[in-house]
Each structure stands twice: as C-alpha cells, then as structure tokens.
Image: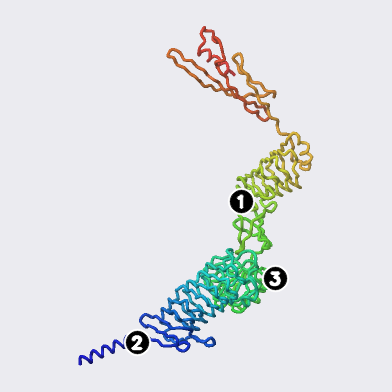
Amino acid sequence: MRNLLVFLVCALLSQTASASVVGGKFGLNNNLTWSYNTDTKTLTISGTGAVLEDNSHWVWGSAPWSAHAADITKVVINSGVTQIGDYSFYECSKLKTISIPSSVTEIREGVFFGCHSLETPIVIPDGQYRIERDMFHECYKLPSVTIPNSVVYIDMEAFSHCYSLTSLHIPASVKEIDGTAFIYCSGLTSITVAEGNPNFYSTPGLNALICKFADVSYPYKANTILAISRNASIPAGGPWNTGYNLFSGRDDIVTFVVPDNLNMFWQDTFADCPNLTTFVTHSASFPKGCFMNCTSLTDLYLYYNESLVNFSDDVFRGIPTENLTLHVPASLVDRYKTNIAPYYEGITIVPLADLTKPVEIGGIYYQLDPETKTAQVVAKPEGTYAGVLNIPATVSLEFKTYTVTSVAPKAFAGSDGITAITVATGNTYLDARNGCNAIIDKAAKTLLAGCAASTIPTTVTSIGEGAFAGLTTLTSLSLHSGITAIGADAFAGCTGLTAIECYAEKVPMIGDGAFTDVTATMQVLASTKEAYQMALAAYTGITVVNFPEKIKTPTITYGDGKVKFRCETEGVTFHYQITGTATNQKDTGDEVELSPVYQVKVYATKDGWIDSDEVSLPINALSIKGDVNGDGVVNVSDVTMVVNMILKP
C-alpha cells in the first residue's frame, strides 16, 4: 500500500512537471525544436538552420506555438538558428523581451506583428537583406532598432505604429524604402542617414528622412519626407512633399500652419492627431483621410482664394463637424455654404479677415500684405492714437505672421494724445533710437512718425512725409545740421508750432505742404537767411530770422586793488562771483599769517544776444603790498580792506 502511494505521488509530480513545458520539432527536416514553459511564459527555439524554405510561408497565427501566443512574455532563440519564419510571433501581445543570436541572418515578414509589449531594443543581425513587410507592425513599446549595413530594402509598414521608437538611423546600404514603412512613428526625436546613401538624406535643419529622387520610394516624388521627428520644423528650400501619414498619431501638434513650400501630397497626413485644434493652409486640396479621427479639430483657415478647396474622401471622418469652422476668403463664403456645408452636418462657414483693409492688432492698425508677409503701420480708420505706442517686430493674424517693416505717411496725424513711442529691439527695419519717441527707418535714416515728445536724433537725415502732421501740441522744433530733406506735409497742421531752429548750412529739400498752417519764427544761420526765405516763400506764416549773435567772452584784470571786467560787445551786463580760500595759514600764538587766493568768475548778458562763455581768474592776495588802511602796520586788516574793495559793486 505504501509503495502504491509513493508511485501515485511520483506519477502526479511527473505529470505536473511535464505539463509545465510543451513543445516539439519543426523546421526543414525537423532540424529545430521549440519548447514553451507555461509557468515562466518563456518560448525557447533551438537547433540548426532555417525554419522555412524560401518559397514557403507561415500565415497569421500558424506558427507551432501559436496556441500560446497570447501568454508568451519572453523568447529565447539559441545560436545555430539562421532564420525566423513569417509571423513567428504574431499577436504575442504580452511579449516583452527576445534575444536574437548573430547566427540569424534572415527575419521574415511580420515576425513581430502585434507584439504590443515588446520593450527590448532590437539589433537586427548583419546579413539581413530586407526589413520585411510588417516586421515590427504595432510594436507600441519598441524603444529602438539597429539596422545593419547589409539592409538594402525596407518594406511596407515595417515599423508602422512603433509609437515609442525615438531614434532612427538609415545606413548607406539602404536604396529603397516603401512610403508606409514609418507611418505612425510619432515618437521619433532623432533621424539620421549615413553619408554616402545614394537615395536618402537627412539634415540637421530638418531632422527627417527625405527621398532624394523619384521612383526610389514608390510612388513618391523627389524631396518627399518619409518620416519626421517631433522637434523638426519645415526649413526653407524645397518644395517638400509629404509622404503617407507623415504626421499621423502626433499628440504634440495643436496648431499647424502649412508653410508655402510644403505640399500635402499623400493620404492620412494628419490622421489620429488627438490634440490638433487649428489648421492653416494655402493648399488647393486635402488628401484622402487628411484629418481622420482628429476629434479636437475646430478651425480650418483656408487661404486658397482661386476656387473652393477640394476635400477628398474621408477627410473629416471621425470628426464632429458640428464643432468645426471653416475660415474662407470672403468672396467664396456663399459658394462654400452652397457646395460644402450641406455635406458636413453642422459645419460653420465664416469669412477670413479682409486684408484689403487695415486690421487692428494690439491697439495699432496695420495694412497686411499676404504676398510679402509684411505689415505697415497705418492711421486709425476712425479717431487717432493715444498713450504709449509700442511697435513690435512682427504681428500675427489668423495664425499667420507678418514682419513690421514700415509706417504709412500721416499714420499718426492729429494724434496729440501720444505720450511716447517705442520700437521692439528685434525689429530689423525700424527703431526708436536713444529714446527719441519717434519711429526711424533704419536703412533710410528717416524719421517716419513722431509725437509732441519727439526729439530728432543727430543720426537722422530726413523727416518723412506727414511725420508730424496735425500735431497741434507740438510747440517747438529743432532741426540739426544733418537734416537734408523735409517730406511733404511733414509739419502740416501743427498749429501750435511757434519756434523752429534750423542749423543746416544748406537748406534741406522741402516737400509740398511741409509747413502748411504753421505760424512760427524760424531761426537760421545768418549766412543762410536769404536761402531759407526763398525756399519758404510759399509759407507766409513762417518768419525767417537770424540766430542771435553770441556775446564775446569777457576779460578780467586786477590792479590798484580793483578787479575790472571788459567786453568787446557793448552794452552788456556782467555777472560775477568771487570766492576765497586760505592756503598756508600759520598760527604762531600771537598772530595769524594768511595766504588767501581768490577765484573770480564772470560772464556777460544782453537782450537779444546769446550769453557769453564764462571766464575765470585766480588772484593771490600776497601780491598786494603796503599799509592799505594807514594804521602803520601791514597785517590781516589790510587784506580785509582789499577784499572789501574787490567785492564792492
């Protein structure tokens, strides 16, 4: 009985142990074996040689271990195996790790199809000629794949939906890549191509996989972008063409402005971008499925104005069109409402901004040029400007950016409420140098627009048309000697302007209406008075006079105990100041010896003249000799008396 019990226990243990491992033989001539441990979830493949003949294939789910595919977490392929057959690990959705020996030189179609959990970096062994179709399709967690220099061709959807793939390097040996090979590789941050590759390239400025020539990546044109990293932007040059699903699955794209040098050429370009809300384009058409399942899309800005944009099949599939607004050229609104809106439930059609008229951006009006992408500061359609005006380097409207390059004549006409003007330091066309409270054209050195608080920098050579027009609070004006031109209507309507100084030795060119309605006295150099009078003859409100002459510098003399002032200009009034300091003072106990020095300063004034320069003279009191006060002793009292004489008016 006891022996029977031992036998039964041993039999039970034997069945348990054998039940945890299943397997069998397979491959050419049964040269390979497979075993699967149901406890450790590990599949092991051993033996020597290939799995299948060249003309034979496994189809989905037909590998010998397919019954366990849903449970396998680890695969070990031992050295000696030379080939992994088609769809060997199809839908092994829990497979995390795999080891591939260097003896493997051929990995066939769809081997890792649906291995959603595969997180082992894959190094494809040298000798692999092709990255076959669907090889890593839907390997969501695959972090990296090393492609050997033996690979020549990368087939359809070989890396499709490898969301976690961050880097991609294409060796020089690769000559053909199918257009769908890298669709939905939305996590790429680095893309490089080896130097010497004849058909593909990448550049640091683009960080993308680009086809050089036609017909090497069917069916693409030259300069087609087959894959692009998350941190890339479309560079200048091109034109570039988009490949299949180029931006598909990207969760980092919220707003996309299509540059003019990018053609949306193939289908599903932005499919499944969950956070895409706004799209801006000049394109004439959208490819099939372009925005499929972009559930957050709310605004399309369509700048193509020659006709209606062509919407291909399924372009809005999976999108709640009741939340979608098309912004279209005003001239085409009615046609869109008639021909497009009826086919998309709830879609809204509204006009784009009318760029034939000035538009207000940040409190300032601009005339925008969509062709040159430039902006000109213009007058308010109604009213005038006030307060502090800050002129930026660029402005944006409807997700398009324009460079601020100029100011229209009379843009600030009558804007007496302006208190200050600044220009952004990044503006390459305009500035408000040295806090001048005016807008200067850098290249032309022209003051384009000012206010009552403006000063004209010495680096400015001309005043632009209507620069100060209508500013009634402008009361005085100083035009430095470097001003060579004053534009038409530059100061027209400045009715508060009463005093003008012009230091130019040659009369500037004066445009029509420059001083219309101005009543002012203009001071000029004596040598230029007649020339200014002739140039300004049409402006009866301008009185040209000479600058007042400057009083000659006075002289100071001292003698006979007196300080005397003289000046070559007659009739002046002298303004003087005398200060004294004691140097070398000596105190012997019963007397004090002083050595005072006096500093005399004086300048002269006269009505209608410019004050003279100030002049000074030091006087040493020790040069005064004798008993000045007649008390029989030469001492401090004598010095005091001399000082009083000097100070006496």
Looking at the image, residue 272 sits to the left or right of residue 469; the answer is left
* Other residues around mark 1 within 10 Å, as few (<14) / some (14–19) / many (≥20): many
Q: Which residue is mark 1?
A: 423
Q: Amino acid at mark 2?
A: Ala
Q: Are marks 1 and 2 in contact (CB under 8 Å)?
A: no
Q: Amino acid at mark 3?
A: Glu
Q: Which residue is mark 3?
A: 306
Q: Amino acid at mark 1?
A: Val
The residue shown at (48%, 88%) is 28
Comparing 50 with 124, the one in front is 50
The residue shown at (54%, 20%) is 597
Which tag is nearer the camera, tag 1 or tag 2?
Answer: 2
Q: Which residue is mark 2?
A: 19
Q: How many marks?
A: 3
Q: From what the image shows, is residue 353 above or below residue 516?
A: below
State the image coordinates of residue 394 (x, y, percent, origin top left).
61, 57
Please report whichever mark, 2 or 3, sits nearer to the chain's N-terminal start. Answer: 2
**How much space separates mark 2 and mark 3, taking CA atoms?**
73 Å
Comparing 419 with 192, the one in front is 192
